Image: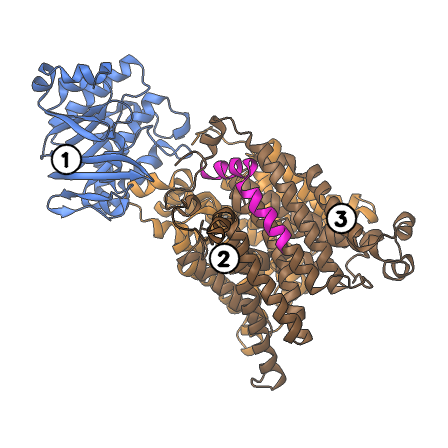
Amino acid sequence: MITFEFLISAISLASLYALLALGLVIIYGILKMVNFAYGELIMIGGYVLYLVGSNTNLPWLIVAVAAVLGAMAVSYLTELVAFRRVREKSLTALLITSFAVSTLLQNGALLIISPRAKAVALPKVFSTSVTLFGITTPMRSILTIAVSIALLVGLTLLFRYTILGIALRAAADNFRMTRMLGVPANLVISSAFVLSGAIAGVVSLFWIGRTASVTPTIGLGPLLIAFVATVIGGMRSLVGAVVGGFVYGMIFIFIGVLLPQTLLNYREAFMFLIVILILLLRPEGLVRVKYAQERVG
Amino acid sequence: MLRVDNLQVRYGAIAALRGVSLRVDEGELVALIGLNGAGKTTTLSAIAGILKPVSGSIMFRDQSLIGRSPEAILRMGIALVPEGRDIFPSLTTEENLRLGAFSRHNRSEYRSDLEEIFELFPILEERFHQIGGTLSGGEQQQLAIARSLMAHPKMLMLDEPSLGLAPTLVDQIFTLIPTLRLRGATILLVEQNVDRTLKIADRVYLLNTGRVELEGSPEQLKSQTAIKDVYLGKG
Amino acid sequence: MKLRRLAEWLSPYSTIIILAVPMLILTAITDLFAGSLLVRIVTVMFVSMIIVLGMQVFMGNSGILAWAHVGFMGIGAYSASLCSMTPQMKAIAVPKAYPFLLNLHLPFWPSILVGTAVAALAAAVIIYPLMRLSDAAAAITSFALLIIINSVLVHWDRVTNGPRTLFGVEEYTTLGTSVLCAILVLILAYFFKESSLGLRLRASREDYYAASAVGINITQVRYLSFVLSAAIAGFGGGLWAHYITSFTPAAFYMIETFNVLAMLVVGGPFGISGAVLGTVLVTIAREGMRAVENEINLNRLLPFDVVGLTEVFLATALIVILILKPQGIFGSRELRWKPKGVADEANEPAVDSALGG
């Protein structure tokens, strides 16, 4: 049952889960805000793929880059237009705003494009298989893993060695203090949103690649995955998010194999139950951090 | 250099500052003392742009600070080291310091700035690659001050730097601050440790329930019985 | 003179009167003059008001977003429907139903009560541990709860007929029923807000630590309030089911959550006046936009069908309100009428705090 091919496909899906979690936590760490519109960035990526792909003859790679840029742009704009002004008001207002933005984007796609699913052209390489060491796997899985690793490495370099990355991590620790050292608040927050959009954009390429179609509601699934994964990994650390996402992905897939059919339907509900339990019993998540900073009030 | 006039700050319905006026001239070490809740931290927060006053003025080198963001005020040359240190616990010492230098645009100065910092705070060189959250309280306090110094502020504001530190470390802090002043820094210091503060300050303001109760040189204040009254509860 | 005495006696309840009287007048006008479409719109509006008021009871007073609220509406809707439908109808509509469910047959009002009770019970059993959480953890867990409730409704097809439509519910809810129930819930919500429990809840919203320090058991206070709000949601859900007569689990998921949130936030979540006004405004906006959509589509004014315009409009309006006036139109204030000389504590500009602020 558990073949190498299955394992590789599991790892490739789990990598996407890890990236999804990371994109969500980047914003949460700094703003303490759960971005309900995050799933829609996947949707935007998909629709750019559809629109550019079916209306031009550009090579797929260019279309893919356009999709990622589209997600980044929309993410940046949602912050600029909506979140920036609500930021100072209250966290609750921010949450509701992100939900409203999510509804707006979804129905915007419904309105401007169509409520029906649209087929997305995928590169031929996605449907080929490759044989390595006697194991045959879809090229898509290999590409997913390769791109995920590349993206994670790139982001690690960004966060470790660039001043922007350091500023983002500092802002997640203590946003006010970061400003008091002269780092502009808007720069930090916009960068976080752009990065989140970039990650979502890349994920969308492979997420859409699984079904080859896009609908207005395609974002809900990834959003929920990001929620669960983030909670499992701990909402405070980027590393935790990645680990949490990966672990969640692997568990989810293996449960899918092990559970009997009747219970399979409740798999999602079950994972959410785990989320609730974790938040109750160990709110800092399952991944340990090297220091503790608890402050009341 | 800094001129605060009749500053009033409210937290909701509660008046925290009821008209505070003070000034700090270039090269001075000015201290704000007073009981808890007197408004010392509130004053510093208002100057740093974290709190918005309801009325009054804050002028720094003839420019108004009111309404400016904390990052803008830092760039104008005022750095605040807040109470409780507030170093970035998940960043290393090096990263903390590097972020302190964010507002400096001259990369080549970074190296020489670090050398100066290591002279003043040798322990930070030892702990250079250690994660901030694992440093001891005294080391964190030094890191917090060092970090703000990396920004080359024209005026440094310190909020209770000796709070919660062991006696030897308190000694270190009270040796450090005059050293900084000797090197030309302008310092606004908030402290609860009245004795030692009076020994190093040029001028002192005594705050009580949101107002300046007394001001003057340390000798002048020492001779006034009012301080004792305030601290022993008659004020 | 007697009139003045009456006015003074009524003035603490003036909010209820100011809200209820126009509602009754509207009902009368609709009943007498309006066509069936308008009757439908107004009836659904009053039922929505019940749901929104239910959310106000918890969210408005505690400051915590209850994402799972419409989930409990769904629980109430399904429970009440399964009680009131005849066994024959159930055999067709829910083919795989459990035998005991098939044989169950209650009149309308007992069914509604069962719906309310099941929703309240579900809340009572599940929600206590979640009440300790705040901020992001509370948001995620309550959102997770909404997902879970939806998942159960969609998959437990021996009770709900799964994702397929549950049809055949009798139309018992009338315009008169809906407005009277809405006024009833209005009174309940108002007295809750002014009650000791409501006061304690509002204190915890203002300042969590101060309220604990004063001895308020915040978890318990939130818990009781949430169960009440879930009961109201179940009540509204039952009434709604018996008007719409057929529905699916999707009716109690994201779209409805957005609707209820919009209605609550636009009017102002901190008082019942806001809940009522918000419901009215959003209903007007929604039906207005829907009419526009239909005009465009039927007359082919544009080369494509406009779908989703209503939601785009409402979402934009909600965002604008959150930017400009996040407290909603009413903020913390209630509509009140005070005769001269009577103090108006609730509308004083000071911080709305039960601790004397």
Query: Which secondary structure class fits the magenta region best?
Result: helix
* Chain letter of disc 2 in the image: C
Q: CA distance from mark 3 to mark 1?
A: 66 Å
Mark 1 lies on residue: B21
Chain corresponding to orange in the figure? A
Earlier-in-chain disc, 2 versus 3: 3
Place of residue B8 in the rendered image (x, y in percent of width and height, measured from the top left):
22, 39
Residue situated in front as seen by the camera: B83 or A13: B83
Nearer to us of marks 3 and 1 is 3
Magenta region: C183-206
Instruction: Check residue C113 in the rendering and tell me which mark sits there, or answer none.
Output: 3
Chain corresponding to brown in the figure? C
| Helix, strand or loop for disc 3 | helix
Nearer to us of marks 1 and 2 is 2
Residue count near mark 1 (Cα–Cα under 10 Å), binned few <14, some 14–19, many ≥20: some
Place of residue B229 in the rendered image (x, y in percent of width and height, measured from the top left):
19, 15
Residue situated in front as seen by the camera: B171 or A7: B171
| Helix, strand or loop for disc 1 | strand
Place of residue A105 in the rendered image (x, y in percent of width and height, measured from the top left):
53, 64
Residue count near mark 3 (Cα–Cα under 10 Å), binned few <14, some 14–19, many ≥20: some
> Does the magenta segment cover residue B140?
no
* Chain letter of disc 3 in the image: C
Q: Which residue is drawn at the image coordinates 27% and 13% (left, top)?
A: B168
How is this picture coloured?
by chain
Mark 2 lies on residue: C267
Amino acid tagged 3: Leu
In the picture, residue B179 is in which quadrant? top left
